[in-house]
Amino acid sequence: MSTSSSTTTTLVHDNAFLTNNVHNTNADDNDSSSSRIALIILNTPGLSSDLIRVSSKSTSPNTDDHAASSASTATEDCSIFQRLWNLSSYRVCADGGANRLLDAVTAAATTNPELFIPDLIRGDLDSLRSDVRQYYSSNGCSVEQDFDQDTNDLDKCLQALAMKYTNEQSESSSSPLTVCVFGAFGGRFDQEMASINALYRWKGKFHRLILYTEETSALLLPEGVENRIRINKELEGPTCGLIPIGFRCESCTTTGLKWNLSNDILEFGGMVSSSNHVENEVVTVHASSPLIWTTEMKRFGDGVP
């Protein structure tokens, strides 16, 4: 993910893994293609039956050949959710996110429900329906209840993944873990802010942490480095934004955008780089404070391959 020299550190960010469209890079880039994927499904609107498709090559998530087969099917004509499900090796539902998954899968007429069994359901479980819990438990899914009211359900899921990732690292030289959160936007505003807060709270704990819906993706760009964002034009853009949440950014300089910044100040109550457009395949961002980078995702059915 990073390279360094005597003067600067470079961090590479991309959504290339969603289409297996990996750019040619040197080994030091450590881009997303070399990372394992974990998926968290939140209890928010947006997961519906039309986003779910089953390939003839689909396999049960609990089989050993799942990762290999999913890589070959991830680029088929399917939604962002389906791509994330196909690519992920570990799937977690945040409390009532399990309700939404089972309801969507059940309503998808061509779907075999047994192909969509998460590995874990975790949260305070105040939203998890009893029928959903029974169904997933009987199909091998672990259910963990955490009553801590100082953490939300997303944090509880991230805690579980961090512990699993730490244990795996201590046992072997496992590949880095990218965590994708589906359903991060489009529901209640306080829940959207909780998703944004997770980017800051869990900064540096995983290889990458990315928020998704079918319409939007967002990630945190750290300060004081050269952030190189490689655009997956098959699935994202051209609309993008740089959002200074939590901090006034005293200086931001970019390349590759229609309206580039040059040592500009970004802050709420002042300038925010919203509704910008990507023009180059690579965008660079230098910022004095962390910034949220967000891109418009091309909706399923709108010419997405």
Image: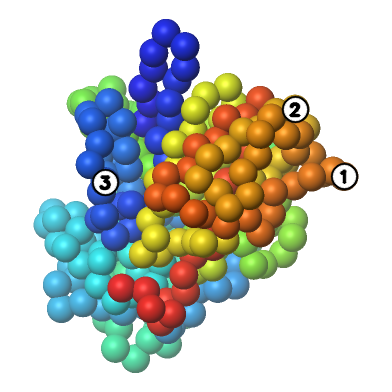
Report if the CB atoms under discs 2 and 1 are less than 8 Å apart.
no
Question: Which quadrant does the N terminus fall into?
Answer: top left
Q: Secondary structure at mark 1?
A: loop
Instruction: Determine whether, in the image, residue 139 is placed left or right of residue 262.
Output: left
Q: Is residue 96 above or below residue 122?
A: below
Q: Secondary structure at mark 3?
A: loop
Instruction: Determine whether, in the image, residue 261 is placed left or right of residue 220.
Output: right
Q: Which residue is mark 3?
A: 23
Mark 2: which amino acid? Answer: Glu
Q: Earlier in the sequence, mark 2 or mark 1?
A: 2
Q: Earlier in the sequence, mark 3 or mark 1?
A: 3
Query: Where does the image place residue 81, in percent across and percent down from the top left?
Result: 41, 67
In the drawing, what numbered circle is on residue 250?
2
Query: Where does the image place residue 47, in percent across and percent down from the top left?
Result: 50, 73
- The answer to whether residue 201 shows anywhere in this view is no
Q: Residues within 10 Å of mark 3 (few under 14, many from 20)?
A: few
Report if the CB atoms under discs 3 and 1 are less than 8 Å apart.
no
Q: Residues within 10 Å of mark 1 (few under 14, many from 20)?
A: few
Instruction: Determine whether, in the image, residue 198 is placed left or right of residue 69.
Output: right
Q: Residue at x 75, y 27 (%)?
A: 250
Mark 3: which amino acid? Answer: His
Q: Which residue is mark 1?
A: 269
- The answer to whether residue 228 shows anywhere in this view is yes
**Which residue is at the front of the view, 127 or 63?**
63
Res 143 → quadrant: bottom left
Q: Earlier in the sequence, mark 2 or mark 3?
A: 3
Q: Is residue 101 above or below residue 263?
A: below
